[in-house]
Amino acid sequence: MSELGELAGPAVWWTFSLLLMGVGVLGTVLPVLPGTVLVLAGIVMGAWIDGFERVSGLTVGLIAVLALLAMLTDFVAGLLGARKAGASSQALLGAALGTVAGIFTGFIGLLFMPLLGAVVGEYLARRDGRRAAHVGLATWLGLLVGTVIKLVLTFMMIGIFAVAWWF
């Protein structure tokens, strides 16, 4: 451990590392927090605490690849759902705005505001209620699937770290 690590003591660093990972897990479902990045930062810190003896640089590299996949999934999933349904750019903007609005309306709002935003955006673009509902649902499902995949990858990152640290 570096001089900085010895100064603060391992318990402080472990607390901070675990806190980063915990907040990161929350960030996988709350779009305001960079969840995957926070989990990765906590894992790197956890590996650093003992000089990468228990968790090697190679293991951290593998976890970083999973983090990149999680970030890519987050970006691509909603777009694929929207593209498959032929969504307009207004629908995508509506879904993004709905996601931000959902942060302030609790879990139910966070779950359904992107759907509402995509429907409103598509309706404003094409004035077709049926199409707007179809595009909104497809966009929402894409975002939902992306979030589930991102959560799975995030827990895989933490699991690989834990297994490497304990075994």
Image (tube, helix red, strand yellow):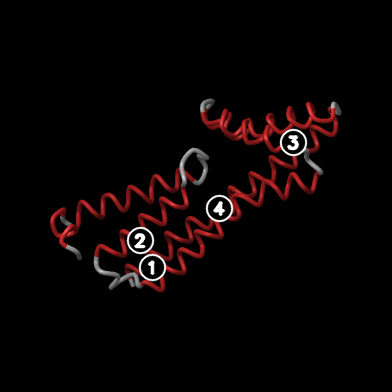
Mark 3 vs mark 2: in front = 2
For label 2, the SS is helix
Amino acid identity at mark 1? Val
For label 4, the SS is helix
Q: Which residue is mark 2?
A: 44
For label 3, the SS is helix
Amino acid identity at mark 3? Gly
In terms of sequence position, does the residue under pointer 4 or pointer 2 come before the other?
2
In x, y percent, where is residue 47?
A: 31, 65
Q: Is disc 1 in contact with disc 3, using a CB cutoff of under 8 Å?
A: no
Q: Which residue is mark 3?
A: 136
Mark 1 vs mark 2: in front = 2
Q: Residues within 10 Å of mark 1 (few under 14, many from 20)?
A: few
Give me the residue at 20% from left, 65% from top.
Answer: 1
In terms of sequence position, does the residue under pointer 1 or pointer 2 come before the other?
2
Q: Residues within 10 Å of mark 3 (few under 14, many from 20)?
A: many
Q: CA distance from mark 3 to mark 2?
A: 38 Å
Q: Which residue is mark 1?
A: 163
In terms of sequence position, does the residue under pointer 4 or pointer 3 come before the other?
3
Give me the residue at 67% from left, 35% from top.
Answer: 93
Amino acid identity at mark 2? Val
Q: Which residue is mark 4?
A: 150
